[in-house]
Amino acid sequence: VTDPAIIKLRTPESDEAGTRVRVLGRVHRARAQKDVVFITLTDGYGYLQCVLTDARRAPPKQHAPNDRELHADFFEIIGKAAGDKEAITTRVAPDADPQTLYDNRHLVLRGETSSSVMKVRAATLRAFRKAFEETRMLEVTPPAMVQTQVEGGSTLFGFDYYGENAYLTQSSQLYLETCLPSLGDVYCVCPSFRAEKSLTRRHLSEYTHIEAELDFITFTDLLDHLEDVICRVIDYTLAEPEIAGYIKQLNPDFKPPSRPFRRMKYDDAIQWLIEHEIPNEEGQPHQFGDDIAEAAERRMTDIINQPIFLTHFPANIKAFYMKKAPEDRRVTESVDVLMPGVGEIVGGSMRMDDWDELMAAYKHEGMDPSPYYWYTDQRKYGTSPHGGYGLGLERFLAWLCARYTVRDCSLYPRYTGRCTP
Ligand code: 4AD
Ligand code: MG
């Protein structure tokens, strides 16, 4: 008999009963009985139950995942595992020390839970790109090394750039805005960096930022677009049966959100927080002008338990570039998308498109506009009403896959105190 071809565990031909196959993979689990050894083999594509027994004897009946089982009459070990860290890869004990797990992230990733999250992550990225491409948006890749800030100087990572000060980018927004006249609506999927001082379950130092910028739109167009993209991404992700299966395992209660999303103005959210006796960071009742901190935001989102578009934040708590609402100049045409279990997953706004107003905003913030000439020129050479947003992929996944922390939605998480492995 000639050697059968090597199969990958996801390929359909491996489903055919009675086929003689050759499989390469890693032992995920092994269990020995008197005359027989059961092995779950994985090759990163799928899992296969194998029965190692004397081929002349019928193997015992046993329920196999996907109702397929390999009866092995020959096997060879390619590379033996040291065996001291098995528990990390297959069964993570609920009381396992998180730092040990992050130190061993390269092995934890082999586990069923972590690898499922990474597969959902890849499918989500595919879905975002598909949704953007369908609306004829163009993907660009702005630089990560910059000399300007977007979201406030306090969270900048600085470094020496041939003797000049430079930073790791916090957001590609300003660069996306510069692309509108030449490329039309654009998006990017790039890392963003934040020197966050706080250790929370939703802050990373490096995260994957999905950002989009749309030209000639109104604030309502921006909200409609966001709702549409989020819903389409969920539809496309669930349309892949294998991925839908992982989501079901990770988040059994997941239901795609119903449209339209609830739209709530910041001012109404403050009233809501007062009525529900949820205090601000100082332990006082909320007032107009307060930042809605993570704890309060999370409680509100969990009680309402559906996606919320929180809009019209006061200018004093938002970034310098946000456009003021024409009907109430105290507030901005801004939006945060909040999801149950996580809180903010998106931040977006309309942008100041008037040169004089933008210059006044720089002055108000005490920022020197000259390093931003390439950004402010947008207003000088043919301005337009435009807006956009940024979505944190790990936060989106923490919501979709019901993970306690965004750290588990990143391949190799970076957060305060961790830059390894
Ligand atoms: O709200 P942010 O800071 O908004 C911006 O950066 C805008 N310039 C985006 C834009 O309009 N193009 O960040 C956007 C999103 C947040 O809603 C959150 O999901 C995510 O990025 N994010 C983080 N995710 C993980 N760790 C952090 N430290 C994050 N900071 C922001
Ligand atoms: Mg934000």
Image: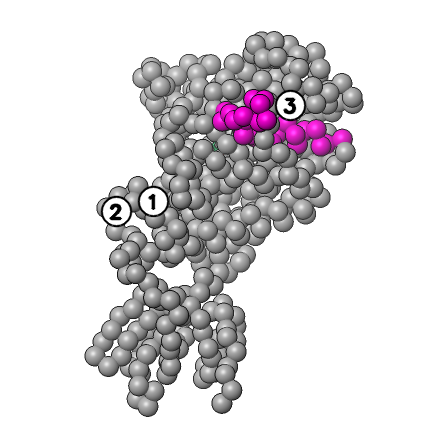
**Which residue is label 1 attached to?**
103
Tell me residue 89's x, y (percent): 33, 56
**Which residue is label 2 attached to?**
96
Element under disc 2? loop
Q: Residue at x 44, y 19 (%)?
A: 291
Q: Are marks 1 and 3 in contact (CB under 8 Å)?
A: no
Q: Nearer the viewer, residue 41 or 65?
A: 41
Tell me residue 316's x, y (percent): 52, 14
Element under disc 3? loop
- Three-letter amino acid code at disc 2? Ala
**Which residue is label 3 attached to?**
351
Spatial distance from mark 1 to mark 3, Cα to Cα?
42 Å
Spatial distance from mark 3 to mark 2, Cα to Cα?
46 Å
Report whether residue 217 is seen.
no
Determine which quarter of the picture holds residue 321: top right
339 left or right of 162? left
Q: Which residues are magenta?
A: 156-181
> Mark 2 or mark 1, which is nearer the start of the sequence?
2
Determine which quarter of the picture holds residue 189: top right
CA neighbours of label 2 inside 10 A, class few (<14), some (14 to 19), many (20+): few
Coloration mode: one colour
115 left or right of 83? right
Tell me residue 67's x, y (percent): 40, 74
> Mark 3 or mark 1, which is nearer the start of the sequence?
1
Element under disc 1? helix
Q: Residue at x 54, y 56 (%)?
A: 239
